[in-house]
Amino acid sequence: MDAPPTMLFGPDRSAERVVRPRRALRAGSAQVVAAAVGLALGLVLPGIDGGYQVSALRAVDVLKVIGVGVLSVTTLVFSLLFLVVQWAAGNFSHRLVLFRTDPVVWRVFALVVGLLVFSATATLAVGSRRTVSVAVPTSALLLTGVALVLVRRLQLNALRSIQLAHVLNDVRERGRKVLLALYPPPEHAGDAGPDAGGTRRLPEVTSTVVWADDTVLVSQVDLLRLVRAATRTDAVVVLKVRVGTTLHPGDVVAEVRGGRVPDAEVLRAVVGEVERTFHQDPTFAFRLLSDIGLRALSPAINDPATAVQVLDSVEGLLRLIASADLGDRSIADDGGAVRVVMRLPSWEDFLRVGLDDLCRAASDAPMVLSHAGALLGRLRTRAQPGRRPSLDERRAWVEQELAARHPAFLRGAAEH
């Protein structure tokens, strides 16, 4: 087996963006930190004796008003946001979690929790004091201002999440970042390293790692952990699963070649979750776009114009990789030796996920079929010669469907 092209690390190069697992800060952790900060400020600030002092009764009134007001506003806003999330899932895709996973959602909630803890703690810490430092009401007002700014931003993000154009743009941009990270543009092909041609032979298989736990979805792979583990024993770990696929008990996770890497080390590097993420998953954006288009073409909605917009976004992503060097990638250690081989989708995989389902569902939508045929023609001029037959095959099918099902549409298009 030959080694695939190698990705090198660097602040501006692709591998640096994908080899590290991206773990979101848990909402509970953010709330605990915010509550701890609020508790500390509530205990420390009322004890300041120097500087300008204000009436303690007035400061307590301010704290009470802020606590009740911020809690009421936040409760109302989050109630509305839950409706927004439900609406977006029902109209676009249940896999669309752009807004729900937005860090600002949990940061707002954490800040509100911290502000409430600060208000309650400071009120109790003031006690029977006649005066208190101006830092107490000032800090409460500043935190309230920050909370209101974030709540406003949260509202704007919620509105964006129910607007088709913004959703398509966000999905396309996230998919674009992943594609550019995994498949650098042709002008940067020389940055991939001296072994980019994939001519180096990998050693023989020494062991096979099998998944023994419950069924999970592979959301990420900790490639750095695998590189370190393989380097210690001069081995190469060849992954047999792709990010975004499901692992069942008994499935082969990886082959270890050359040296020996403990199975536990390989299995710990597989990050299993219940939902797919954009990080390391180049087909997830295509899946989401296809979901939105399929829902638009369903008999219940019947909105072919939305499917046309989806095809425009799909074309934008396919153009990025039409002439790129697709296929698996090797991850090298600091010395340049291949240590991990990462499985990635092929050209056919991208076309299958991004176009095939949409084209099949658009058999009764001539506008969508016509747009898909034009899309395939434009892609053909940019694609590598070896990828053109698959585009020609799909374009021939689209033209055949148009001629058989919608001859009047073709005649009208020819007249104009």
Image (cartoon, rainbow, N blue to C red):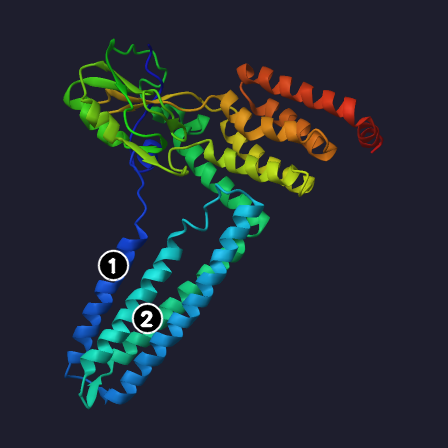
Residue 370 in the image, given as x and y percentages of width and height: 71, 30
Residue 222 appears in the picture as rendered: yes
In space, the residues marked 1 and 2 are separated at their CA atoms by 17 Å
Quadrant where the C terminus sits is: top right
Say few, some or many: other residues with alpha carbon within 10 Å of mark 2 (under 14 / 14 to 19 / 20 or more): some
Q: Is residue 210 above or below residue 220?
A: above
Q: Is residue 119 above or below residue 363?
A: below
Quarter-of-image position of residue 42: bottom left
Q: Secondary structure at mark 1?
A: helix
Q: Is residue 277 left or right of residue 385?
A: left
Between marks 1 and 2 in the image, the one whose residue lies nearer the viewer: 1
Quadrant where the N terminus sits is: top left
Q: Residue at x 37, y 67 (%)?
A: 147
Return the mark for residue 93: none
Return the mark for residue 143: 2
Q: Is residue 239 left or right of residue 396?
A: left
Residue 232 in the image, given as x and y percentages of width and height: 15, 23
Residue 349 in the image, given as x and y percentages of width and height: 50, 23
Quarter-of-image position of residue 207: top left
Q: Residue at x 20, y 17 (%)?
A: 235
Amino acid type, mark 1: Val
Which residue bears the numbered disc 1?
A: 32
Amino acid type, mark 2: Leu
Of 234 and 104, the residue lying toward us: 104
